[in-house]
Image: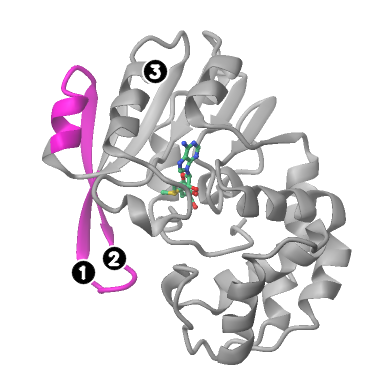
Amino acid sequence: MNSPISRIGGKKLLRKTICEAFPKSETYDRYIEVFGGAGWVLFYKDRHAELEVYNDADGELVNLMRCIKYHAGELQREISCYLNSREMFLDISEQLKCRGFTDIQRAARYFVKMRLSFGADGRTFGCNKKPLKTSTDHLAEVQKRLLMGVVIEHKDFEDLIKVYDRPTALFYCDPPYHTTEDYYDVDFKQSDHIRLKDCLKSIKGRFLLSYNDDDFIRDLYRDFKITEVTRSNNLTSGKYKELLICNY
Ligand SMILES: C[S@@+](CC[C@H](N)C(=O)[O-])C[C@H]1O[C@@H](n2cnc3c(N)ncnc32)[C@H](O)[C@@H]1O
């Protein structure tokens, strides 16, 4: 199934390749999506493992996933009050900086902001002609998928990995790409790339990591298996090289 939202860095075009690169499914019983984002890889399969975890450090995204899981109908009704307009996009962007909304009101605003922005960057109005109404048709199906036992976490990656690490765990890590960290609302520094490598190098479980093809990343993970993959770039219609890195 598709993710309920598009989001910059989303793995819509690479999700099949990523899932094919996972170890055989009978060899792991917990699947942890450490940098969940829009969850394209999670939603690609009906089920990855007995225990599934979606995590992100961005509280707006996590609140949206929780509201879809527990209040999909109410969220859909709230979203139906919005229009596809530049004014509404700008107002919502300002409102999301304020307190005082309910979780469902926040989730609806965040959903609309993502939906109306250019390339799902959440920052510029996208002049998208698709009506907002149809974008929520899918929420009930996503709710069912999340209710199948997907645990939703809101943690920094290091803490999350420590909590869920077992020999039978598979971590899918899709961090902010090197040199494009500021596309996201959560701060991710050069030292965080190093912290992630230090954390992954000693886990008991297995990991698959996706990154942009970058010299710093190739050097950082030189002791691991690195596979080069190519995907089309939906914004520029060109080809884009990415790396899949794993410890198995
Ligand atoms: C490349 S995106 C993930 C895209 C996702 N795989 C998808 O298909 O939509 C990276 C995500 O990492 C999250 N993030 C940034 N810093 C983080 C941290 N320290 N711990 C966990 N998540 C973090 C961002 O909020 C962002 O959603």
Q: Residue at x 59, y 87 (%)?
A: 130
The kind of residue tagged 2 is: Asn
For marks 2 and 3, give the CA distance: 30 Å
Give percent across and percent down for residue 103. Answer: 79, 57
Secondary structure of the residue carrying tag 3 is helix
**Residue 243 x, y percent position in the rendering:** 25, 40
Ligand 1 closer than 8 Å to label 3 CB: no
Q: Is residue 18 magenta?
A: no
Residue 12 location in percent, x, y?
45, 57
Q: Label 2: state its secondary structure.
A: loop
Residue 208 in sight in this render: yes
Q: Is mark 2 within 8 Å of ligand 1?
A: no
Give the residue number, with chain letter if any, for mark 1.
238
Please state if 15 lies on the left or on the right of 99 as rendered. left
Q: Nearer the viewer, residue 170 or 7?
A: 7
Which is more toward the observer, 170 or 24?
170
Q: In the rendered structure, which disc, 1 or 2, sits on the residue that comes first in sequence?
A: 2
Write down the quadrant of residue 210 in the picture.
top left
**Mark closer to the chain start, 2 or 3:** 3
Q: Which residue is mark 2?
A: 233
**Callouts 1 and 2 close, C-beta under 8 Å:** yes
